[in-house]
Amino acid sequence: MTHPLSDRISSLPVSQTLAMAAKARELKGQGIDIISLSLGEPDFNTPDFIKDAAIEAINQDYNSYTPVDGYVELKEAICTKFKRDNDLVYQPNQIVVSTGAKQSIANVAQVLLNPGDEVLLPAPYWVSYSAIAILCEAKFVEIPSSIDDDFKITPAQLEAAITPKTKMVFFNSPNNPSGSIYSEKEYRALAAVLEKHPQIYILSDEIYEHINYGVKPFSFAAIENMFDRTITVNGLAKAFAMTGWRIGYLGAPQWIAKACTKMQGQITSGTNCIAQRAAITAVLAPVEKVQYMVDEFETRRDLVLELLGEIEGFKLNIPEGAFYVFPDISAFFGKTVNGIKIENANDFSLFLLEKANVATVTGDAFGAPNCIRMSYAASVVQLKEAIQRIKEAVS
């Protein structure tokens, strides 16, 4: 029996990160000891000072519908944060608070893209970018990079990818899945290309901004002649260990912010009231208050790079941010390992799940078919055990 689903949902791919996490949970439910390195979720608890702010909001009886674009106090706090951390001057009417940064990105795409428009995605890119473009009936165009380039595209590649149909380009630094960070010099070189194409808008996803290891990220909107064409998206999930609180936000030209508010008003309306009140405290907090998490991630990164470096066939770069490693494992392609023929990254990821009981995500999902993504948002004990299992499975 066929079901009359829309073409829109039928054409939409399943999120590979969520699919692998679901598969890992299914195997765990069968009693199999799976170590999951698939989800991008900090394994810390939300800091107490943020939880205290939420409790205070509950006790103050915040329980009503919120403004569609967010409490004005939160939007003012976000403006303060943008100026403090990014040297970006936004007004509250340029801020929209959403149910996670993913909704912020989807709102922007929905209000700017028409069917047939092209969206440039420097690869590797977060899995939902391409799906969001598909939902808008737009076409996504991958701009490839490799581990040898530290997973960064060049101005020449960007210029070559632009056509009369190009409407947007998505940048993500620090990058999910690679952890790479574009320097100010690199971003300015890309901006010099975009200056020649004023019809193109830039979405700068900075959700991993505070998770960096000595290399401060640079905001694309801080480039003077790019500010009026750039939408800066951020949120609290990663740096503040608030994934389930679902708070994202954007800063944009007022006309785009107004359109996003209109879109959101017909889909979810305003974001959770308690989470927003707690978010005011989080956004205004000095970054140093969450530095202990960043320090721990850096320790784990170094451990994972050391241990994976001992496994022949894993080609590594040094990620400067986020909490992922993205090794090139193409050396295994065409080989039979532990009785299983490996043809591609998807085969290798499934091989690790079946033979090592370690969940990773295929690089195909990120536009990088030679790689797999491994999250080190897990305990040191789990990371050591997972990599030992991988080493034994491929040896």
Image (cartoon, grey):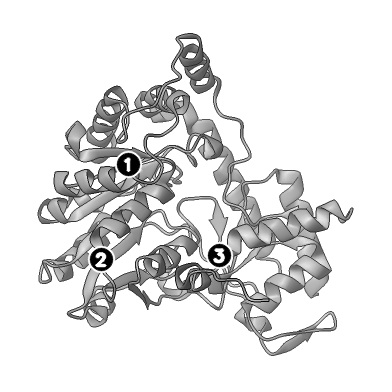
Residue 304's spot in the image, x, y percent?
A: 64, 55
Disc 3 residue type (three-letter): Phe
Residue 326's disc is 3
The mark nearer the N terminus, 3 or 1, is: 1
Tag 3 secondary structure: loop
**Within 10 Å of the Cα at label 3, are there few (<14), some (14-19), or many (20+) other Cα atoms?**
many
Residue 330's spot in the image, x, y percent?
A: 61, 81
Q: Is residue 227 above or below residue 325?
A: above
In the picture, the quarter occupied by the C terminus is: bottom right
In front here: 181 or 110? Answer: 110
Disc 2 residue type (three-letter): Met
Callout in the foreground (2, 3)? 2
Tag 2 secondary structure: strand
User: Separation of disc 2 and disc 3 at Cα?
Assistant: 26 Å
Q: Is 342 left, or right, of 204 in this rendering?
A: right
Q: Is residue 92 above or below residue 306?
A: above
Residue bearing the label numbered 2:
168
The mark nearer the N terminus, 2 or 3, is: 2
Residue bearing the label numbered 1:
265
The mark nearer the N terminus, 2 or 1, is: 2
| Residues at discs 3 and 1 in contact (Cβ within 8 Å) | no
Q: In this view, which residue lies farthest toward the right? A: 31
Residue 325's disc is none
In front here: 56 or 270? Answer: 270
Disc 1 residue type (three-letter): Gly
Tag 1 secondary structure: helix
Q: Is 24 left, or right, of 151 in this rendering?
A: right
Name the residue at 59% across, 60% down.
Answer: 17
